[in-house]
Amino acid sequence: MPADAHITPKERIAKDLAAVPRKPGAAKPDSIIVADNVTRRFGGMTAVDVHHLEIQRGAITALIGPNGAGKTTLFNLLTGFDKPNSGEWSFDGKEVSRMSAAKVARAGMVRTFQLTKALSRMTVLENMRLGATDQSGEGLLRSLVPPLWRTREAEITAQATELLERFKLDTKAADFAGSLSGGQRKLLEMARALMTKPTMVMLDEPMAGVNPALTQSLLGHIQDLRDEGMTVLFVEHDMHMVRHISDWVVVMAEGRVVAEGPPATIMQDEAVVDAYLGAHHETDLGDDSLLDDEVLVELEAEAEAEEHRTQEDA
Ligand SMILES: Nc1ncnc2c1ncn2[C@@H]1O[C@H](COP(=O)(O)OP(=O)(O)O)[C@@H](O)[C@H]1O
Ligand SMILES: [Mg+2]
């Protein structure tokens, strides 16, 4: 029997990445994204200045770094929501730099985006249906126009229903999306992104505002995506989550990739911790607490409010 007959996807990926040098811009054995010389300036300020970056196919990669490091900007560039000043990158072997967000989504790379006011006033199921057609806010509304819509409606509804069941939101299908808790919104955002059957999912701070009760469920869903063969790239401040679920960590500071490696290596790298994550995150890295106090207070308040609502409903 081969030695790796029973290893988990996580173990297999760790093995695949074991020989990758722990240095910025390191080549990967099977890259789904290859980016070169990507820059984005705002006025005189350079928000993103990435010389070379490769993202391993099928892995969960965490993008971390202090506020203002350029994580969200890089995210927006890769997914077509923003245009670079320079640079090229490919996704799944296709040149996608400067493509529209809709085209990037059709190529198989989708990002979650938050519930806008308009989307909050739609039901959970309507949100899901919109996810099937386009991934940009206004395009979503335009895409409601028949007849293209009607021809696929039944198929789309079936797929939406299946995903809502998977994310345990099926009982909420007819509720307004705005009535969901913070954690349920995150689940809906993820479920909606899956409507296009993507190859790669990009998550910007998936744990922000999530009730502790839903934390494990959300982590499980993200790992399920990876275990099904999807590539996941996420930006996150919660170091517990980064350490717990990521296969690889890329550290950004001042627009550049300054370090990368497996989570255990990166988290133990004192230079990385001190120089790039700062004092606030140092405590977060040191102890094993899930969330820092400030966030916890907010989440507790949210959980309490939710409990009140549930009691009123009963
Ligand atoms: N639309 C914008 N206009 C001007 N400056 C921006 C814009 N978006 C981001 N920036 C700046 O670019 C830098 C990187 O921001 P961002 O990508 O949001 O960082 P991060 O997500 O790592 O916190 C910050 O200094 C931010 O103020
Ligand atoms: Mg950001």
Image (cartoon, rainbow, N blue to C red):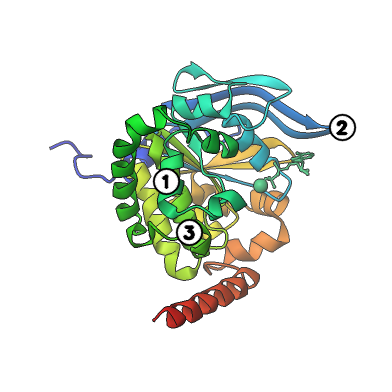
Contact (Cβ within 8 Å) of mark 3 with mark 1 = no
Relative horizontal placement of residue 261, taking residue 84 as reference (left or right): left
Q: Is residue 27 visible?
A: no
- Residue 38: image x %, image y %? 67, 25
Label annotation for residue 128: 1
On residue 138, which mark appears? Answer: none
What amino acid is found at the position of numbered circle 2 in the picture?
Gly
Name the mark nearer the viewer: 2 or 1: 1
Q: Residues within 10 Å of mark 2 (few under 14, many from 20)?
A: few
Q: Which residue is mark 3?
A: 176
Q: CA distance from mark 3 to mark 1?
A: 12 Å
Question: Can you give x and y, in whole percent of width and height, for residue 254 in the image?
Answer: 75, 40
* First in sequence: mark 2 vs mark 3: 2
Quadrant containing ligand 1 reads top right
Mark before the other along the chain sequence, 3 or 1: 1
* Residue visible at 60% across and 64% down in the picture: 284
Which residue is found at the position 70% from the left and 62% from the top? 280
Q: Amino acid at mark 1?
A: Met
The residue lying at 43 percent from left, 65 percent from top is: 214
Label 3 neighbour load within 10 Å: few <14, some 14-19, many 20+: some
Q: Amino acid at mark 3?
A: Phe
Write down the residue under mark 2: 44
78 is higher (above) or lower (below) than 276: above
Q: Is residue 193 above or below residue 143?
A: below
Q: Position of residue 271 (x, y in %)?
A: 67, 49
Return the residue found at the far front.
146
Tag 3 secondary structure:
loop
Tell me where residue 151 sits by quadrant: top left
Of pointers 2 and 1, the one earlier in the residue sequence: 2
